[in-house]
Image: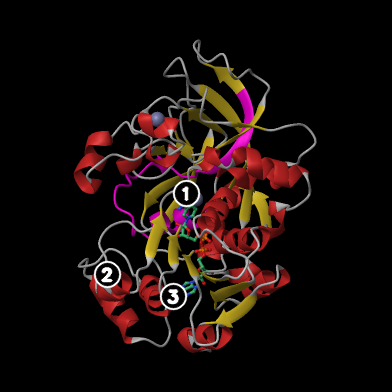
Amino acid sequence: MKALIWQGKKDIRYETVPDPRIEHPRDAIVKVSSCAICGSDLHLFDGFMPGMKSGDIMGHEFMGEVVEVGKDNSVLKAGERIVVPFTIFCGECEQCKRGNFSVCERSNRNASAADKMFGHTTAGLFGYTHLTGGYPGGQAEYVRVPFADKTHIKIPDGLTDEQVLFLGDIFPTGWQAAVQCDIEPTDTVAIWGAGPVGQMAIRSAVLLGARQVIAIDRVPERLAMAQAAGATTIDFANESVLERLGALTQGKGPEKCIDAVGMESHATRSIDALYDRAKQTVMLETDRPHVLREMIYVCRPAGILSVPGVYGGLIDKIPFGASMNKGLTWRMGQTHVNRWTDDLLRRIRDGQIDPSFVITHTVALSDGPDMYTTFRDKKDGCIKVVLKP
Ligand code: NAD
Ligand code: ZN
Ligand code: ZN
């Protein structure tokens, strides 16, 4: 079959690889109808996330038709249409029983490596480094889905791929980021990053009743999309984020802050950004935490910082004293995708939201390698790419 493989830093290729096959009785094989490139894939493309090997199949946001199931999988049948959540989960361990699917204790087949790095293992993820299991991803014609009797979302008839594809990642990710803010009707929610995750967080914060939503980015079409959802926008390349946030909140700061940027944040007017670039280049710091510093500084005391943006390792010069003394609450994590499925699928069916609004590019899987660059560099108005195998 054909797939997009990670060959090395900034080197994604469209190549022929062996077809997946059933390896465990709970597995399923899915023929992919649509898949997407996620901001998390960019961290692998740019070489900032450790643990990739050349030849790894990329992709963790995908859906398609079940074509084969293992003999113990009585939940799925060939011919069914499913979205596959990016977090692989067993459904039986203590964490899964609590709905903490992204920290499933059993689905990471390289658990000992994760144990060493993080103190505990987290869930297996598709197409996302050998620290999270090294599972082949979904930017491919076919995928093996481990624990497929649990790791799936069945799609009712009458909904297009584009309407439901993002139930596997960015929609619940933006939603979880907003839910973790415990939004009150009087709240201002400030969201750094108006990429696909930021866009979903903006709409989620609006749906959850925030008084004011403020989106921060520097890409004009992303800011325009945020405005269309009702957000006030700040262009961090041309305005002071801290001053504008102060002015928009009577000097008090937003009660809730969401980091939808993660480890590759940019900054145009700060010394800390130069410091991070230098340290990241010589590998003394893995991630660039400029947004985290801004959030700690500007958040209203007793507020909440919610971090869906991905960080991989070590960060530096975090004003923890400010965070502690201001009594800030931190919420974060990879998304517990299936925890939110029923609610979000209902909202799509009710017409409260159609997540396809974020798609700007739909191309063949074979165009994937070029699209990684287009998406990363925000060329051609690119906000979200869907690939068709
Ligand atoms: P993206 O790269 O398209 O979006 C990031 C946006 O942040 C860009 O528009 C960029 O211009 C903007 N940005 C950069 N520096 C900024 C700054 N200093 N202030 C404000 N905005 C800034 O990616 P995406 O798909 O939207 O993903 C965003 C983050 O969410 C990534 O880190 C990704 O890994 C993460 N993510 C996490 C989960 C999860 O489960 N927690 C799931 C999906 C994605
Ligand atoms: Zn993702
Ligand atoms: Zn589990």
Circles 3 and 2: CB atoms closer than 8 Å:
no
Q: Nearer the viewer, residue 389 or 67?
A: 67
What's the residue type where badge 3 is placed?
Cys
Q: Which mark is residue 13?
A: 1
244 lies above or below 316: below
188 lies above or below 76: below
What is the spatial separation of the Cα atoms under label 2 and label 1, in whole angstroms? 26 Å
Circle 2 packing at 10 Å, graded few (<14), some (14-19), many (20+), is some
- 253 sits left or right of 68 in the view: left
What's the residue type where badge 1 is placed?
Arg
Q: Which mark is residue 280?
A: 2
Q: Point out the stretch of residues depicted in magenta.
A: 38-66
Q: Give residue 110's quadrant in the image.
A: top left
Tell me which residue sits at (69%, 33%) in the image: 155
Q: Nearer the viewer, mark 2 or mark 1?
A: 2
Q: Quadrant of the C terminus?
A: top right
Q: Nearer the viewer, residue 319 or 87?
A: 319
Circle 3 packing at 10 Å, graded few (<14), some (14-19), many (20+), is many
Tell me which residue sits at (43%, 85%) in the image: 268
Circle 1 packing at 10 Å, graded few (<14), some (14-19), many (20+), is many
Tell me which residue sits at (44%, 76%) in the image: 300
Q: Nearer the viewer, mark 1 or mark 3?
A: 3
Q: Which mark is residue 299?
A: 3
Identify the secondary structure beneath mark 2. helix
**Ligand 1 under 8 Å from disc 2 Cβ:** no
Identify the secondary structure beneath mark 1. strand
Q: Give residue 95's quadrant in the image.
A: top left
**Ligand 2 under 8 Å from disc 1 Cβ:** no
Answer yes or no: is residue 318 visible.
no
Residue 65 counted in the magenta span: yes
Residue 213: image x %, image y %? Answer: 61, 71
The colour scheme used to paint the residues is secondary structure
